[in-house]
Image (spheres, rainbow, N blue to C red):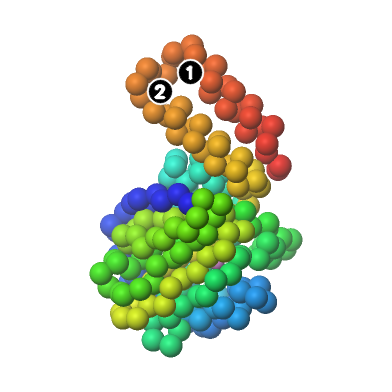
Amino acid sequence: MIVIDNVLTAQELSFLRSQLRKADWAQGISAGSQARLAKHNLQVAEDSAVLPEMRMTVLRALNRSEQLLTAALPFKILPPNFNRYTGDTNRYGPHTDSTLRPLPDGGYLRTDVSATLFLSPPEDYEGGELSIQDSYGSHSAKLPAGSLVVYPSGSIHEVRPVTRGERLACYMFMQSLVKDAEQRRELYQMDMSLISLRRKHGDDDPDLIALTGLYNNLLRRWSEC
Ligand code: NI
C-alpha cells in the first residue's frame, strides 16, 4: 500500500466537489458477483453529464504524479469512477476487485493496481476508513482530500461503515506493466532510492548511471506488455 499526497490541486479538488453536487447517482454497478454483495454505496451514473470532464480532470492529475507512475507502472487505466458513502449506503464489505474489467472500446483490462483518491476532508465523516490486507498485515487509510492510496487489486479490502457525514471518493483500476505485486514493490523501492541518490550525488555519477540502467533492464525483463 502506497500513499501519494496532494495528487489534486486545490482548484481540481473544488471543481470535482462542485461537479459531484450536480451528479446523478446509481447503486451497485461495476463490481463482480462476490463484490456486488458486499457493495453498499452509490456511484456516479455512467450517463451522468458531469462524468467525462471529471474523469479527464483526474486522469490529468494522475499523469502528473511521478510517484504514481513508478508505484503502479500503469499500462492501461480504466476511466475513474466516483462514489459516495452516507446514510444506508455507507459501506463496502471485504472483497477483492475482480480481475477482468471491460474496457470502453472493447476488450478487457486485467486489474493489477487499485487506487482510491479521497475527495472529502476526513473531518467531514466518521468511519469510512479503507482497510487493506496484504502480505504485511492490515493497513488503514483515511487521507486528506486530494490524496491517493494505491494497493494491489488482489488484496482483500473494505470501506468501513460511515457513521456520520458523507465520504466522497474516486476509485480506479489499472493494468500494470508488471503484474506481480512483489516485483512492482521491489521496482518501486529501487526507483525511490535511485531518485534520492540522484538528489545527493547528481545525475552524472557513473555508479548511478549504471544502477539506473539496471533498474530499466529489470523493468524491461519483468514487463508483460
Ligand atoms: Ni474494491
Residue positioned 35% across, 73% down in the render? 127
Eyeballing the image, is 169 above or below 7? below
Which residue is the extreme one toward the left?
123
Q: Amino acid at mark 1?
A: Leu
In the depicted structure, whether residue 75 falls above or below residue 191: below
Q: Is mark 1 within 8 Å of ligand 1?
A: no
Query: Badge 2 is on which residue?
Result: 198
- Under mark 2, the amino acid is Arg
Task: Give the quadrant of residue 110.
Answer: bottom right
- Please name the residue shown 52% across and 75% down the image: 93
Residue 166 image position (x, y, % from top left): 34, 77
Residue closest to the eye, 71 or 91:
91
Q: Secondary structure at mark 2?
A: helix
Earlier in the chain: of badge 1 and badge 2, it is 2
Q: Residue 16's x, y, as percent? A: 37, 66
Bin the neighbour count of mark 2 within 10 Å (Cα to Cα): few under 14, some 14-19, many 20 and up: some
Q: Residue 54's quadrant in the figure?
A: bottom left
User: Horizontal placement of 158 versus 144: left or right?
Assistant: right
Q: Are marks 1 and 2 in contact (CB under 8 Å)?
A: yes
The residue singled out by tag 1 in the image is: 208
Q: Few, some or many C-alpha atoms within 10 Å of disc 1 (few <14, some 14-19, many ≥20)?
A: some
Is residue 142 visible in the rendered image? The answer is yes
Residue at point 39%, 72% (across, down): 128
Q: Residue at x 58, y 69 (%)?
A: 95
135 above or below 145?
A: above
Residue 193 lies, in percent from the top left, at: 44, 30
